[in-house]
Amino acid sequence: MTPRILPILAAALLALPVIARPAGVSAATAAGAPVLVELFTSQGCSSCPPADAFLKELSGRDDVIALSFHVDYWDRLGWRDPYASGWNTRRQRDYRDAFALPYVYTPQMVVDGRDQAVGSDRSAVTALIDRHRRDGGAVPVTLDARGDGSARLVVAASPGLSGRLTLFGYDREHRTDVGAGENSGRRLLNTNVVAVVEDWGPWSGEALDVTRPLPDPRDGRGYALVLTATGGTPRTRVLGAARLGAAP
């Protein structure tokens, strides 16, 4: 079976459990929290451009943090994606295991680390985003630039919870002329392509206010901070997320 999902299987993969709001986090504190959407994609996958286009639309919403993770398992089929990495593939495999899926596939969108859908299925992804906005369950997180190449991170206290903080640096846009593989001859547009990942350490549930230098700052680089739970089901669920500055 190819890495892409067959349409006949798509509906089955959408049937995932609804995760209750974590203890200690109220709907009020979750109000206005952005929803994290991760697209797993590849320039070597002919089914991916519609999902890439959808992610670009989502990136313009101020209630969504949309990130693109290029996987490397398509590289062997004729085109080496310049933005693919083994780290991205491992992250997707973690989701496969957490969701008890039989395999990884592209295009896949993961919403708040708790639900997934075929990345080009606009209605399914939109429904998941809307549900997570209603359900809340986020720990309030803010990330603000300091003007000296650093950022101030503030996480609200949420007793009884714990997690890990990860900073993602992303390039807002790449256009690529593809010379081989399934998309040969096409110019592809990729948005919010994750280029750098930095572990910002554990979070114990206590209030946090720290300033850290940003990795690899450059023109056009955006940043998103994701707080992932270290317990509960699924183990990949996002407790909170923030982008640096305004939406792109």
Image (cartoon, grey):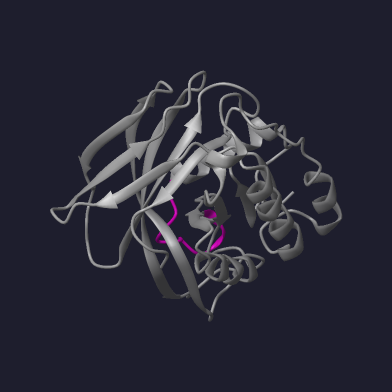
Residue visible at 56% across and 53% down in the picture: 37
Q: Main secondary structure of the magenta part?
A: loop
Inspect the magenta stretch and tell me whether residue 80 lies in it.
yes
Residue visible at 60% across and 24% down in the picture: 23
Residue 113, position as x, y percentages in the image: 59, 40
46 with respect to 201 (left or right): right
Inspect the magenta stretch and tell me whether residue 31 lies in it.
no
Mark count: 0
137 with respect to 247 (left or right): right
Q: Which residue occupies the extreme left position in the image?
A: 148
Residue visible at 55% across and 76% down in the picture: 184
Q: Nearer the viewer, residue 219 or 84?
A: 219
Residue 154, position as x, y percentages in the image: 33, 39
Residue 221, position as x, y percentages in the image: 30, 61
Q: Nearer the viewer, residue 160 or 9?
A: 160
Q: Which residue occupies the extreme right position in the image?
A: 8
Quadrant housing residue 4: bottom right
Q: Nearer the viewer, residue 203 or 167?
A: 203
Q: Quadrant of the C terminus?
A: bottom left
Residue visible at 58% across and 44% down in the picture: 112
Q: Is residue 162 above or below residue 172?
A: above
Residue 61, position as x, y percentages in the image: 53, 66
Q: Which residue occupies the extreme front position in the image?
A: 28
Q: Nearer the viewer, residue 28 or 82?
A: 28
Task: Specify the segment rendered in magenta.
Answer: 76-85
Q: Is residue 113 above or below residue 97?
A: below
